[in-house]
Image (cartoon, rainbow, N blue to C red):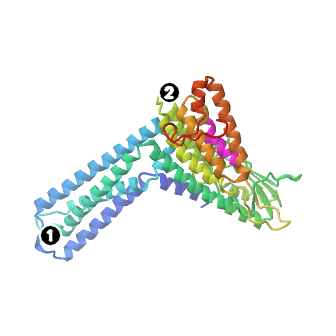
């Protein structure tokens, strides 16, 4: 199985809502058979005994309750889908589908229902699965508790700020992972300059967004074949069918390896956060833009998004994006990839919020406070980009707020947008 197939299978399982409940249903049947075997061999004390009518009523009630609760969980899921597409960002759904609490709740409910059904079919006038009925009661109690935890968790997750924090945490985790990969000695981020013609061009067989690269596999292959692989596209780019996915320089490889190399690139219908921390910024910005739309008009929500957006940008800005393990002298890189610079991340996180929030005093004040904090915390080589964004913010204010009785309020940095202890900087 190629690397891209393994990646797709893993992503499908992580995002699927039916795989874990199906496993729960199978386990419910297996445990039901085990409970019946125990009842056939073990005599339980009298207080664990049930009459056939009582056992039938209890198991039937458990089947009905778990089926109803499963339907309610699905209803809550549909509600979150509606909220995500109308209030948050439709791209958030990729994280929602992966929530372990949602899948565990469905799995326990479906497993308990299957367990009870498996026992119910064996209740007879001369045989009652006493141990199984007791176990079913324990399982349905655990399922109810898990359902309450699920309900509490996702009621709180209907808030945009909770969604933003979830996305920010995923983005920061991905950035740490990608930072370790991009600092490898065998990987270069500079344009590969050579007069040599590529020995092989690997083209895509379908259109789609690049979701991930098998960088370790490509480096290993390039070193083994004394070649240099150049990836002209970055993770997150959409490539049309027939587009060049990679250029191979060095010894002319066998055409048969083209399929192997193509298997190191995953194309999908949309971007993911797996190797693309900028996609997390994209989702957070989308949530802020939804809040700033005239249909919603919730600038305070945008300010809360800026809180988590600023922390993510601070993590990126304090990292040495150019840090590299010392390469072996005279040895060319094995892999050349395109990566985002600090300016790219900063522009993604700031530009559209500044544009669409230009009529909101609290958004502009919070944005200035965030940029002031970044200017003080990021690495020195990154500060000029922050200063440039502050200049663009001033230009936006001059254009949108020409009257002095409001302009003096807009130019103040406020960590809460409006109402917090304002910070009057030099020249403001």
The range drawn in magenta is: 342-352
**Residue position marked by numbered label 2 in the rendering:** 294
Say which quarter of the image contains residue 181: bottom right
Front disc: 1 or 2: 2
Q: Residue at x 16, y 74 (%)?
A: 44
Residue 18 image offset from top left, x and y in percent: 41, 52
Q: Is residue 120 above or below residue 243?
A: below
x then y, percent, for residue 352:
61, 35
Please, what is the dominant secondary structure of the magenta stretch? helix
Where residue 139 appears, as percent x and y from the top left, is 26, 62
Q: Based on the picture, tell me whether residue 343 belongs to the magenta stretch.
A: yes
Q: Is 191 positioned to the left or the right of 98 in the image? A: right
Side of 236 where 53 appears, left or right: left
| Image point (75%, 54%), residue name | 189
**Would you name the residue on which mark 1 appears?**
48
From where the camera sits, is residue 276 visible? no
202 horizontally vs 154: left or right: right
Q: Nearer the viewer, residue 149 or 334?
A: 149
In the rendered image, residue 383, in percent from the top left (x then y), is placed at: 70, 48
State the residue in front, 119 or 190: 190
Q: Secondary structure at mark 2?
A: loop
């Amino acid at each position: 199985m190629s690397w891209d197939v393994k990646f797709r299978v893993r992503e499908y399982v992580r995002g699927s809502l039916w795989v874990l409940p199906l496993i729960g249903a199978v386990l419910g049947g297996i445990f039901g058979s085990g409970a019946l075997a125990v009842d056939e061999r073990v005599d339980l004390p009298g207080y664990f005994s049930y009459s056939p009518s009582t056992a039938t009523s209890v198991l039937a009630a458990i089947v009905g309750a778990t089926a109803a609760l499963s339907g309610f969980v699905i209803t809550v899921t549909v509600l979150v889908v509606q909220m995500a597409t109308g209030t948050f960002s439709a791209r958030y759904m990729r994280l929602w589908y992966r929530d372990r609490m949602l899948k565990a709740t469905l799995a326990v409910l479906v497993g308990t229902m299957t367990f009870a059904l498996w026992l119910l079919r064996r209740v007879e006038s001369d045989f009652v699965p006493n141990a199984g009925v007791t176990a079913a009661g324990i399982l349905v109690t655990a399922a109810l508790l898990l359902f309450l935890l699920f309900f509490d968790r996702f009621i709180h997750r209907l808030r945009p700020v909770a969604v933003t924090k979830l996305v920010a945490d995923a983005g920061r985790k991905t950035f740490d992972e990608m930072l370790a990969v991009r600092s490898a000695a065998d990987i270069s981020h500079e344009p590969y300059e050579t007069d040599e013609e590529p020995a092989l061009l690997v083209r895509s067989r379908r259109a789609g967004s690049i979701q991930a690269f098998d960088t370790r596999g490509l480096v290993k292959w390039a070193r083994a074949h004394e070649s240099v692989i150049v990836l002209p596209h970055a993770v997150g780019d959409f490539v049309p069918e027939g587009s060049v996915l990679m250029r191979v320089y060095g010894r002319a490889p066998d055409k048969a390896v083209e399929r192997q190399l193509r298997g190191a690139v995953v194309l999908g219908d949309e971007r993911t956060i797996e190797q693309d921390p900028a996609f997390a910024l994209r989702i957070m910005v989308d949530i802020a833009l939804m809040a700033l739309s005239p249909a919603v008009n919730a600038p305070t929500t945008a300010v809360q998004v800026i809180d988590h957006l600023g922390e993510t940008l601070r993590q990126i800005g304090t990292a040495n994006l150019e840090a590299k393990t010392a390469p072996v002298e005279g040895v060319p890189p094995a892999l050349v990839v395109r990566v985002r610079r600090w300016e790219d991340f900063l522009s993604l996180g700031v530009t559209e919020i500044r544009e669409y929030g230009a009529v909101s005093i609290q958004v502009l004040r919070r944005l200035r406070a965030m940029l002031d904090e970044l200017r003080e915390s990021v690495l020195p080589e990154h500060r000029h980009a922050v200063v440039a964004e502050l200049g663009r913010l001033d230009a936006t204010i001059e254009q949108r707020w020409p009257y002095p009785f409001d302009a003096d309020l807009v130019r103040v940095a406020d960590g809460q947008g409006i109402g917090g202890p304002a910070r009057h900087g030099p020249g403001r």
